[in-house]
Image (spheres, rainbow, N blue to C red):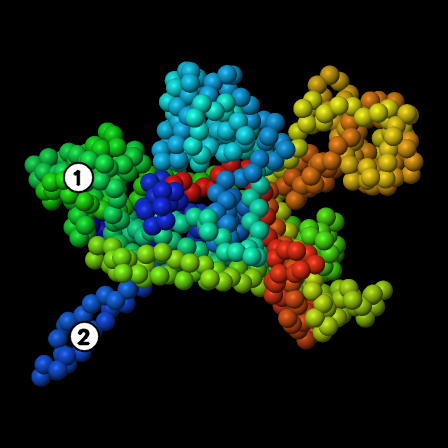
Amino acid sequence: MAPGRRQLQKIQIGEETQAQGTPATYFSRARVAGGMLNDNRSIQVVDEMLGIIPGPTRSYVSSADGSISLSGTNLSPQQLPIHTANCITGQTYGTLSAAASTLAVADGVKTLTCVTTSPTITVSASTTRTVGDVIYSSAGVYVGTIKTTATGTSFELVNYASATLTGDAYRFMTAAQALTTSFLYDFPLPTTSFPNNVVSYTIQAGDDFEQETTTYAKCNGFSASGGSGGAIDMSAQYMTQAIRLGVLVAGTITTSLASTAVTGVGTTFVASDVGRKLYTTDFIYIGTISAYSSATSVTLSANALVALTASAFTIGGFSVTTIPTPIEDLIFARTRLYLNDVATWPITTPTPVVNSFLNFSYQLQCQWTPKFTGEGYQGIDPTYSFALMTNYSVGGDFTIEHNETASGQYSASPVESLKYAWRNRVPKIVQIDCPGSTQLSWFTPNATTVGSAATGTISITSGTSAITGVSTTFASSDVGKDLFYSPSAGVYTWVGRIATYSSATSVTLAANYIGTTITTSAFYMLTVTQPYFPVAGQGPLKTYTGVSFRMPVIITQVSSISDNGGNDIVSVQWMQRYNNDAGSAGDVRIVNQIATIPVAG
């Protein structure tokens, strides 16, 4: 067989939904540019006094684990949740935004039954579900995504169901709706306890010549960095259990040297196993799966090379996968830096650093401690039984122009400067927003979401910000609320967000109204959550995709003045810490159009 080629290398990741360390069944390709599995097994040579130079070949493996470093990849809001779910919290599916909550509709009076140990869902009456349809419970909990278009009462998801339901009046949205709707992934950094719900992964990696597999992968950390004129880079590091050609899976198989048939008992073969390789528990090659019949029956591409009778086995090679889409590269030119004094968390209107932000780096390191207990022996590899997170740290730096933000010499208040904060140990809140360019629906105004009309009528001229009311009852507490009106039946248009209150009949918007002039119209007033990455002119209706790093920090160093092409700059190093006034240690927030992270389990 020809040697392997770099262009045919790939890495596939699967969530271990049944138990950590139990091999995943379904996989997704990782959109990365570099990184292969490293086998870190420790081989000990036994020293004996046998009168022989230099001694015999006696040796043993004292421990076996592995690692993989995923690097050379642009930061993407569609792929970052893979790493954050594995090292911060176990959130593997996105929270419905206000837009999505109104798009997910009931399937008539049909009900749904499913369990978390199977990818099959059952509907109470015949219906048609299309590939990519996103299924939710009646309470809005993500259940799964339809794998194949079908009509009937039984459907297969792309992964195991995320919830156990019995006779639930489920809801769904189409794939097209999901791809224009915002899903939120919010990963708060832990403060009073270590997260116990982070997921573990099975990783397949290799090329066209050889593929290796490992289990119980835990993210030791990820980093992001970017600067003027380029994309934002991302890398992630994982520790894993022992690396092998195959992993031990459930059930036993029977094979014959004169047959291509493989008969299983208690096995869980799936259609995506076609192309994978079967091995004995000692990793002797049995054959390659060429066809799938059922969970207990597959066919090899040639007669089995090993005869087995009701024997345990391992499976390796690549599962059948497609390339995850969409994917978006975040670029530095759209990135924003915000600096604030510590106040009530979160900062609703962070203060931007304008025309000064030049580059940044962000590093999150998780200290996972592998535990090599007595029962950790897997086949021929003494690997770790479980892993505990025992600490984590977040730090980074950014470079800005040498101006009032850096030194504060000419600032109205020197406490605003980073140099003052550093020298006087004043904590700050740093927020680095990395929005994408894809616009998604954040809030959908309709009869359900806007509710009942407010008291009175309003008028406003296009291109102005003054609202004049008749019989209205505006109050100072209405500042920050959003106004809508209905130009025609069933249509609701955003007018603007109230910025200032003057009287019960007079308020001013935060920005000029850009629609058609409104004259004595009924209106609706409600509080809509501000998007993480608002689209200019769209208010709370639209958001960009993106990633936001937000944390209370201590400034640990402000560099001496250096220059970039003769322009003076300074670099600022920071360390994330819990802040009692803020009551938080920070978070990582992600907005994308993916209902679940692209890792099936």
Amino acid identity at mark 2? Val
Which quadrant of the structure image shows residue 301?
A: top left
Q: Earlier in the sequence, mark 2 or mark 1?
A: 2
Is residue 179 found left or right of 249 in the rendered image?
Answer: right
Quadrant housing the C terminus: top left
* Left or right of residue 165: residue 25: left
Asked which quadrant contains residue 383, the reply is bottom left
Foreground: 453 or 257? 453
Question: Residue sitting at 71 percent across and 74 percent down?
Answer: 423
Question: Residue at coordinates 44% horizontally, 36% vertically from top-left?
Answer: 162
Where is residue 281? Give x, y as percent: 19, 50
Secondary element at tag 1 = strand
Image point (47%, 24%), residue name: 168
Q: What amino acid type is highlighted by mark number 1?
A: Ile
Q: Position of residue 339 (x, y in %)?
A: 71, 58
Name the residue tied to disc 2.
46
Disc 1: CA contacts within 10 A as few (<14), some (14-19) or many (>=20): many
Q: Which residue is mark 1?
A: 253
Spatial separation of the CA atoms under disc 2 and disc 1: 38 Å
Q: Position of residue 529 (x, y in %)?
A: 69, 39
